[in-house]
């Protein structure tokens, strides 16, 4: 029988460990490569021939006509009444695309700021700016492509869910300024909150771009009647228009 003392056992284990570490150090590393198409992606989607993001819609848009009444506010109008009333008519070709017609008329008169210029403060003798004789906005008509980018729902309580539509607008039309009609281009973004599958609250924000008469390019303090738009210098405008109201969708046909 061979007996091994504890110190000999420790020396033997230490020697075996050194041999093992040396073998690992001098071993050649092997690089394993996988084809890119076989690697897992960060997100995996199910494969369908015709993927559908929404099923069993509560609010269906395809082949439906939508009518609405709107009130609006011109966000960047400094001189004339910024309030307006109008309406909208839409035809939804499918769930994503549609055609929107928008028309509005502006309330007449001066803005609160422009009224303070009759007379002009600290003018001696008192002089009225008479901006009411300039080319005030009268009407706006737009024809736009409407794209319903997002359809979803919002839960207020356990028993009540409101459906939503987020949409974009891109179009062109005519802008009535004084006695002139100017071409205008428009882009916008809107949101609809559906109380029922047919009735909804709607608001949209549009940006308008056009070239029109500049009301302060000529003196109006010595005028006593509305001046023609051709008497003013032309200027490029970028303005904002906010509208809100209710709309109703007719049954599909």
Image (tube, grey):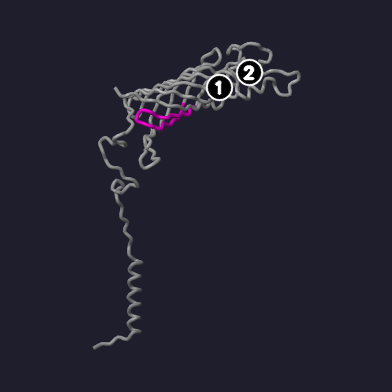
Quote the CA–CA distance across marks 1 and 2. Answer: 19 Å
For residue 225, side relative to residue 25 (left or right): right
Residue numbers of the magenta segment = 187-206
Instruction: Please name the predominant secondary structure of the magenta segment in the image.
Output: strand
Determine whether the residue tagged by mark 2 lies in a helix, strand or loop: helix
Percent x, y of residue 111 = 60, 23
- Check the picture and name the quadrant holding the C terminus: top left
How would you rate the neighbour count of disc 1 (Cα within 10 Å): few for under 14, some for 14-19, many for 20 or more? Answer: few
**Residue drawn 33% across the image and 73% down it:** 19
Q: Which residue is mark 1?
A: 236
Specify whether residue 200 is painted magenta.
yes
Q: Residue lying furthest right in this view?
A: 124
Q: Is residue 228 left or right of residue 123?
A: left
Instruction: Depth check: give the residue in front, 20 or 163.
Output: 163
Q: Nearer the viewer, residue 62 or 246?
A: 246
- Determine the residue positioned at 66% across, 23% down: 116
Q: Residue at x 29, y 46 (%)?
A: 37
Residue at x-position 43% and y-position 29%: 202
Mark sitting earlier along the chain (1/2): 2
| Picture quadrant where residue 64 is located | top left
Residue 131: mark: 2
């Amino acid at each position: 029988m061979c007996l091994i003392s504890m110190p000999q056992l420790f020396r033997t284990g230490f020697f075996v460990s050194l041999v093992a570490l040396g073998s690992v150090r001098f071993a050649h590393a092997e690089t394993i490569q996988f084809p890119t198409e076989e690697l897992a992606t960060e997100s995996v989607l199910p494969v369908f021939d015709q993927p559908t993001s929404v099923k069993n819609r509560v609010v269906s848009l395809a082949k439906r006509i939508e009518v609405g009444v709107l009130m609006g506010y011109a966000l960047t109008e400094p001189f004339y009444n910024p309030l307006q009333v109008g309406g909208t008519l839409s035809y939804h070709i499918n769930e994503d695309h549609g055609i929107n017609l928008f028309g509005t008329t502006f309330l007449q008169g001066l803005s609160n700021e422009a009224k303070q210029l009759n007379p002009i403060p600290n003018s001696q003798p008192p002089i009225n700016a008479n901006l009411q004789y300039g080319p005030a906005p009268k009407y706006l008509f737009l024809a736009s492509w409407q794209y319903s980018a997002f359809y979803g729902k919002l839960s207020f309580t356990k028993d009540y869910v409101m459906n939503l539509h987020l949409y974009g607008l891109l179009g062109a039309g005519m802008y009535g300024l004084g006695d002139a009609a100017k071409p205008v281009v428009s882009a916008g973004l809107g949101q609809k909150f559906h109380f029922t599958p047919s009735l909804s609250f709607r608001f949209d924000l549009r940006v308008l771009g056009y070239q029109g008469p500049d009301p302060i390019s000529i003196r109006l303090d010595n005028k006593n009647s509305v001046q023609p738009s051709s008497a003013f210098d032309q200027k490029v405008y970028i303005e904002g228009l906010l509208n809100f109201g209710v709309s109703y969708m007719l049954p599909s046909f």
